[in-house]
Image (tube, coloured by chain):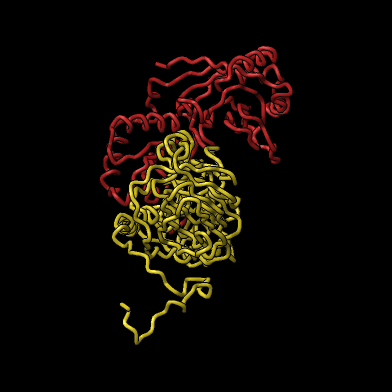
Chain colours: A red, B yellow
Amino acid sequence: MTENLEIPETWPQIKTVGLAGVIVTFSGALSEPANRAAIAFRAAVGEMEWRDIEEINSTLVSTFLRINLSVHKPEPIIERLQELVDSKDWLSAPLPTGRTLWRVPTLFGTGRAPQLAEAAEMAGRTVEQAVTDLSTTRMRVLTIGFAPGQPYLGTLPEHWDLPRQTNITPNVPAGSLVTAVRQFCLFPYDTPTGWRHVGATGFLSFRPNSAHPFPLSAGDEMIFDPVSEAEFVQIESVDHSGNGGAQTEVLG
Amino acid sequence: MSDHLIVRSIGPAAAIQDLGRPGFMSVGLTRGGASDPTALHEGAALLRQAPSSAVLEMAGMGGVFEASAEIRIALTGAVMDASIDGTSVQWNASHSVPAGSILKIGAMRQGNFGYLHVGGGFDTPSYLGTRGCHLSAGLGRLIQAGDQLPIGEDKSKDAGCQLVPEQRLDGGKIRFVRSMQSNKFDDATMTRFTKTEFRRDPRGNRQGIRMDFVGDGFQSGGQLNIVSEVTIAGDIQITGDGTPFVLMHECQTTGGYPRIGMILPCDLNKVAQAPVGSLLRFELLTLEEGTAVQARANAVLSGLRKSVKPLVRDVSSIQNLLSYQLISGAISAKDSPLD
């Protein structure tokens, strides 16, 4: 008898992406181990220095290798990748070393980040508790995308699993810290968004005129330290680098 | 000051372009670059220079330009009316423009993106290593009247050449291969997709182009709970209502809609150049067929120089033929031409 038997998917999966490359996906849903695996696997592939790979990217749960498949046959590449995939349990692999921890002075709430109270209420927290949650959770750059340099940061406690707004906020300024679905985004430009605007920073994740236009990498960690409005204005007046007074530390 | 092209007037969507800026995907920046890269290879073959030279991409309409010195130009991509000091000149050809001459590029006859190449390439400022404008990332800007576009050193003087361009300005058959999420679409949906006639929708830009069609959408299983994944130019993305969008060179680097497949790079030009309302049909190739087709297209591009021929002026293309002095000075058939 045939039923609609779901064939259980097994992970990781290696697939071709058109003629543009090959992708290794560690899970069908976003999870901390799958994201960690994607970042760790990206670093491991990078160390192999395979010449057919033009660039490597890690997304939420995958590592993508850009390879011109009209020049390089996919089968041997997939074979090499399968060998690397099988060489260890990537879901329990540690994050690579040499990542950066960023501590970014952040003004939560006030007129500069007007949706803190609304977001706190939706999360079932007082404004004070909300600031504690948002400023003490050490957030990982899960991936960078959507706009140049723009990080998706995770993961906030479960009660911060807020849906996106149904209405789009027409414009939040560059450096805005916004939240939805237990994540933060930190916008490099003024942008419309469906995420709620809870913090203001002077941190620009894309600095086109700088020697280091992209300060962040997937796997970096960020802490958003609360500052008063007076301190925030002071930082704005002295730091014009796009760093917004952020301090860094190399993670071992 | 180096030689330059003075922009007297310009259409609303002209920008310096090149073959794009690879290598920044992991920091959220797609490659970008010209909408019709084949046109860049054709212009480079006509001027016998590198296809990486920066060009002026003109969407929809051209402009009026003045050369500060004698320069060489080539015109490729969407066919547009063009003249030098009032004399019409052929598209898909290279020409010499004397110092102070006025080059006019007017209405578009066929296609969407026309290209003005100069010998030596445009030597405008580069951003993150290349000169191509990436509007959605805020790199570079549109060209405005009054701009003076610097021109790099031209090592050649050869002009007056033509080539027959690859047919790509009126839609038609677009070949694609399966990609990482194609298995989310059942066989019946995939078959229906390849049998549907699409029309290029007016909703489109350098990030993506909507495909219009009659009938049911092309839903996948599990459309709503897909994890965001890499997006690449050429992806055929199916939005929530089942409508295909073809992602173009300035698309984002990540997206949450499932992709039914990916168009071969050699056929993405056709999507870019397809005029609004033109018919497009998607043909599914196996990965093996797709790589073979693309490899042949790559070989054609690298051999383009061999197909460049001297320009022979076709009398029927001279629009102001009646203004030419064709009678006086004509010789008698009886007289010796040496008298």
Q: Quadrant of residue A111?
A: top right
As drawn, which residue projects farthest toward the front? B339
The answer to whether any part of residue B183 appears in the image is no
| Rendering coords of residue A217 (x, y %) | 45, 27
* Closest to the observer, A177 or B317: B317
Q: How many marks?
A: 0
| Rendering coords of residue B41 (x, y %) | 37, 53
Left or right of residue A121: residue A11: left
Q: Quadrant of residue A137?
A: top right
Q: Is residue A168 above or below residue B98?
A: above
The answer to whether any part of residue A211 appears in the image is yes
Q: Is residue B80 above or below residue B15?
A: below
* Closest to the observer, A19 or B271: B271
Left or right of residue A85: residue B315: right
In the rendered view of the protein, which quadrant contains the C terminus of chain B?
bottom left
* Closest to the observer, B314 or B245: B314
| Rendering coords of residue A197 (x, y %) | 67, 29
Q: Residue at x 48, y 28 (%)?
A: A213
Left or right of residue B147: residue B118: left
